[in-house]
Image: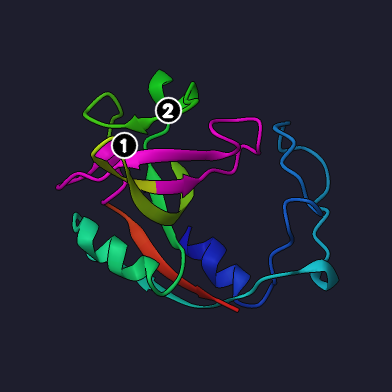
Amino acid sequence: MRKALTYAETHPLMTLHDYPYTAETWEGECKYNKKMGAVSVLEWGDIQENEPSQIKAALNVGPVSAGIDSSSDLFMGYLHGVITGTDCGTDLDHGIVIVGYGQENGVEYFLVKNSFGVYWGDNGYVKIGIEKGDGVCGINTDGMIVKTN
């Protein structure tokens, strides 16, 4: 993710509309067009590990890039509600963007935008419970604050 954020400092990101997720193999050509770039990363920095309060504070500045363990059936088959507990592991294998936080039925959660497109999860989003330590799916272990234009 750090390499991607560094890249995005000089290569504005295209919208999902202009460069949609296709869930196909990695073969083929990159269709990136800098002229269609909509958002640039201005700067970014690491967030203190295992401190969900730091993630919340960072969200007041901008989105948070984070790694999670996406290998569980619970995550892959997510449709609605808040993922909590230890049913997700903590072996980070997937990058996501935390865009906010809230509460549902008394359970605090981070609102996460996933890269799988709008047909996955709840219109492309998942709610991951806010817990101390590594956090649900390891969400507290490798976060970066991102400032964009």
The disc at residue 137 is 1
Q: Splitting the image into 4 quarters, where does residue 50 fall?
A: bottom left
Residue 80 image position (x, y, % from top left): 46, 28
Q: Earlier in the sequence, mark 1 or mark 2?
A: 2
Residue 16 image position (x, y, % from top left): 72, 51
Q: Residue at x 74, y 61 (%)?
A: 14
Residue 58 image position (x, y, % from top left): 34, 69
Q: Nearer the viewer, residue 61 or 90?
A: 61
Residues under numbered marks 1 and 2 in contact, where contact means CB atoms less than 8 Å apart: yes
Prevalent SS, magenta region:
loop
Q: Residue at x 20, y 45 (%)?
A: 134
In the image, taking residue 47 as reference, residue 27 lies left or right, namely: right
Q: Secondary structure at mark 1?
A: helix
Residue 55 seen in the current view? yes
Q: Splitting the image into 4 quarters, where does residue 91 fall?
A: top left
The kind of residue on which mark 2 rests is Phe
Which corner quadrant holds the C terminus?
bottom right
Q: Is residue 72 magenta?
A: no
Q: Residue at x 54, y 71 (%)?
A: 6
Mark 1 → mark 2, Cα distance in angstroms: 9 Å
In the image, taking residue 118 as reference, residue 43 lies left or right, namely: left
Q: Secondary structure at mark 2?
A: helix
Q: Residue at x 28, y 30 (%)?
A: 89
Report which residue position mark 2 lands on: 75
The disc at residue 66 is none
- Give the residues in magenta: 111-140
Where 139 sits versus 126, above or below?
below
The way the protein has been coloured in the rendering is rainbow
Residue 93 seen in the current view? no
The kind of residue on which mark 1 rests is Cys
